[in-house]
Image (tube, rainbow, N blue to C red):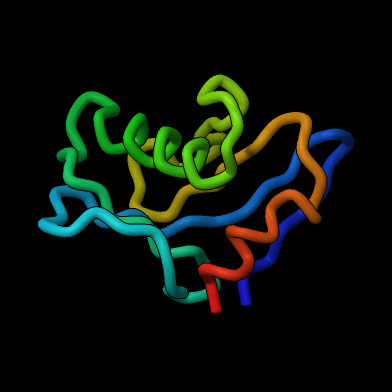
Amino acid sequence: MIQIEAKANDCLFQVHVTPKSKRPSIGGLHDGALRVSVAEPADKGKANKAVTQAIASLLKVAKSRVEVLRGETSRRKTIRVRDVTIEELKPIADLAL
């Protein structure tokens, strides 16, 4: 199960990113992190941008509210979603099952 941490009005969780994937998707677990596959390469932040856009789309929030907090050059990243409750992240928790 994915661990979601609430801090003030924000929530943090871990993702494991697979760049240059033939089939972009969100779902499943990889070592306790949500698995996210994106078509974009890990070059000049393109994969990070695709990850934040995919998560924002899934949660139906503005892209500006989702950011890579830690791990910009790593496959494992900490994602912060601003102004959201843990209950609103239920779609993320459900995908990690």
* Front residue of 70 and 56: 56
**Does 9 sit left or right of 67 as displayed?**
right
**Does 92 sit left or right of 25 as displayed?**
right
State the residue lying farthest toward the top: 64
Residue 15 position within the rendered picture, expressed as x and y whole percent measured from the top left: 47, 56
The residue lying at 10 percent from left, 57 percent from top is 22
Quadrant of the frame with the C terminus = bottom right
Q: How many marks?
A: 0
Q: Is residue 46 above or below residue 19?
A: above
State the residue lying farthest toward the front: 60
**Does 42 sit left or right of 36 as displayed?**
left
* Quadrant of residue 71 within the rendered picture: top left
The residue lying at 52 percent from left, 68 percent from top is 95
* Quadrant of residue 83 within the rendered picture: top right
Residue 69 position within the rendered picture, expressed as x and y whole percent measured from the top left: 57, 35
Residue 8 position within the rendered picture, expressed as x and y whole percent measured from the top left: 89, 36
Residue 56 position within the rendered picture, expressed as x and y whole percent measured from the top left: 51, 36
Q: Is residue 10 above or below residue 65?
A: below
Quadrant of the frame with the N terminus = bottom right
The residue lying at 63 percent from left, 38 percent from top is 80
The residue lying at 60 percent from left, 32 percent from top is 61
**Does 10 sit left or right of 23 as displayed?**
right
